[in-house]
């Protein structure tokens, strides 16, 4: 662990305390502002000094809750993850205060200050962490506190990792040497190199490195007090979702298809129903207008029913606004030779002659997909998930691609917000596989927000 990271993380504790104190004082003065007192007169009788005497020990409790929430962990968090933990921690701390005052109203009687403190504390702590986040990146960019690493390997993963670390110094790593393998010769070379420059850790980036070399490399790092990281193989990454139980007294490891199990599945379904029901109600007047425009533009129904493959390989009927001529599916066989997606089983044609004039705009604005929220209410789909594909496309899936059928397909997904229809199919599968293996409710929210940005701004969001 770098001394820089220890100091930087340790400083967050007093800094958070001071920011929380500022939030408490600001909340107190907000309560006595005229624009608030005009709406609700002040009923409590407590001077600022008395108020602060009660706040000082209270904020220690907040810091403890922050620590339990992982806000002082040395694990590197993404900024959005840190903001999520801040919201959870401030909400938990505020709830604890409300519960305490509920059982003893004599402690404090101003509900406004408590609620204001919750909001102001979240905003100020978030701003503080955003600023410190970018200050830390600035230090890394200048070379302060970076981890000096040796990367070992010679496959594509190795060269990709080196390129990324050099391109983005804000990750906090500086590659000082690259070695293709690890033998006694490399071990001797690293020993001599350490006499000249500081080496903090070694990264084994080649998943195909012989097991004997992996063992020697691990032992070398242990014996020489060097940090050690390695890029996991496909099997090792699959082991991120596992349970260890005993079966007749024997330890058994169960590898799960996805984290989307148990309460996670229940929470996702609740979100799907509430979100989709709200969208359907809001779009009732808009739907009538869209239907009229479709009927005036070309002959055929307003909605189309398409057969798609859902979770577990089961067929379901997908609903969309009609954006093609009435017999579009029958015409598909005549234009298969013009398929622009030769990297996988999907069909894609930029200037598809089957698309109507209005259909071009419906697709461009993603309006044609709105009826799929009805599919979500029925339980065939989810708001977020892999894209649903046609039966003939699924029939041409390769073995590893069938893992996309482990969960419900979605209206939007990890692949759609990372390149929309421009991604190679292999990359689309990789992104959707990551989503399946690493699902969380917060990841769903993030994808929904990115989807809105993609649709409104008409550009990709990374």
Image (cartoon, rainbow, N blue to C red):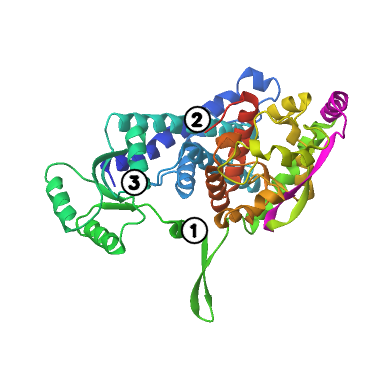
151 and 298: which is toward the camera:
298
- Is residue 25 shown above or below 150? above
The residue beneath circle 3 is: 158
Q: Is residue 35 magenta?
A: no
Mark 2 vs 1: CB contact within 8 A? no
User: In the rendered structure, does residue 300 fall within the stretch colored magenta?
Assistant: yes
Magenta part of the chain: 285-312
Of badges 1 and 3, nearer the viewer stands 3
Q: Position of residue 373 (x, y in %)?
A: 76, 41
How far across and down, in percent of the image, does residue 402 sit?
Answer: 60, 55
Q: Which mark is residue 124?
A: 2
Q: Are marks 1 and 3 in contact (CB under 8 Å)?
A: no
- Res 109 visible: no
Question: Label 1: which residue?
Answer: 238
Q: CA distance from mark 1 to mark 3?
A: 20 Å
Dot 3 and dot 2 residues touching (CB under 8 Å): no
Drawn side of residue 247 relative to residue 372, left or right: left
Sequence-wise first label, 3 or 2: 2
Name the residue: 50% across, 30% down.
124
Q: Of the two numbered discs 1 and 3 on the same chain, state the one appearing first in sequence.
A: 3
Q: Is residue 68 left or right of residue 142?
A: right
Left or right: where 300 falls relative to 435: right
Q: Is residue 45 left or right of residue 151?
A: right
């Amino acid at each position: 662990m770098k001394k820089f990271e220890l100091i930087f993380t340790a400083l967050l504790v007093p800094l958070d305390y001071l920011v929380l104190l500022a939030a408490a004082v600001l909340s107190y003065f907000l309560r006595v502002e005229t624009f608030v007192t005009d709406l609700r007169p002040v009923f409590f009788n407590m001077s600022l000094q008395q108020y602060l005497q009660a706040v000082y020990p209270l904020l220690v409790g907040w810091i403890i809750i922050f620590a339990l929430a992982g806000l002082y962990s040395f694990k590197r968090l993404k900024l959005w993850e840190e903001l999520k933990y801040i919201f959870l921690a401030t909400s938990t701390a505020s709830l604890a205060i409300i519960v305490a005052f509920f059982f003893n109203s004599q402690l404090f009687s101003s509900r406004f200050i408590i609620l204001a403190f919750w909001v102001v504390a979240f905003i100020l702590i978030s701003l503080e962490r955003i600023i410190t986040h970018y200050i830390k990146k600035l230090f890394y960019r200048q070379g302060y506190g970076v981890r000096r690493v040796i990367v070992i390997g010679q496959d594509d993963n190795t060269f990709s990792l080196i390129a990324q670390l050099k391109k983005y110094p804000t990750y906090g790593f500086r590659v000082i040497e690259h070695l293709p393998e690890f033998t006694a010769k490399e071990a001797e070379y690293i020993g001599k190199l350490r006499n000249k420059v500081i080496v903090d850790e070694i990264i084994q980036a080649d998943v195909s490195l012989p097991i004997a070399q992996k063992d020697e490399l691990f032992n070398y790092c242990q014996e020489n007090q060097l940090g050690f990281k390695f890029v996991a193989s496909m099997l090792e990454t699959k082991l991120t979702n596992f349970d260890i139980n005993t079966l007749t007294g024997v330890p058994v490891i169960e590898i799960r298809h996805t984290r989307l199990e148990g309460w996670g599945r229940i929470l996702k379904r609740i979100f799907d129903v509430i979100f989709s029901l709200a969208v359907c109600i809001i779009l009732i007047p808009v739907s009538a207008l869209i239907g009229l425009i479709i009927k005036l533009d070309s002959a055929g129904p307003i909605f189309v029913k398409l057969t798609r493959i859902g979770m577990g390989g089961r067929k379901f009927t997908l609903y969309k606004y009609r954006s093609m001529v009435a017999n579009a599916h029958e015409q598909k066989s005549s234009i298969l030779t013009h398929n622009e997606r030769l990297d996988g089983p999907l069909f894609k044609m930029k200037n598809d002659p089957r698309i109507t004039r209005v259909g071009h705009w419906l697709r461009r604005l993603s309006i044609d997909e709105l009826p799929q929220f009805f599919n979500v209410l029925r339980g065939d789909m989810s708001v977020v998930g892999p894209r649903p594909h046609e039966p003939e496309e699924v029939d041409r899936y390769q073995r590893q691609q069938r893992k996309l059928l482990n969960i419900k397909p979605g209206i939007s997904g990890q692949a759609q917000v990372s390149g929309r229809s421009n991604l190679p199919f292999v990359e689309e599968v990789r992104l959707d596989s990551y989503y399946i293996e690493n699902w969380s409710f917060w990841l769903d929210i993030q994808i929904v927000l990115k989807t809105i940005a993609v649709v409104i701004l008409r550009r990709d969001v990374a």
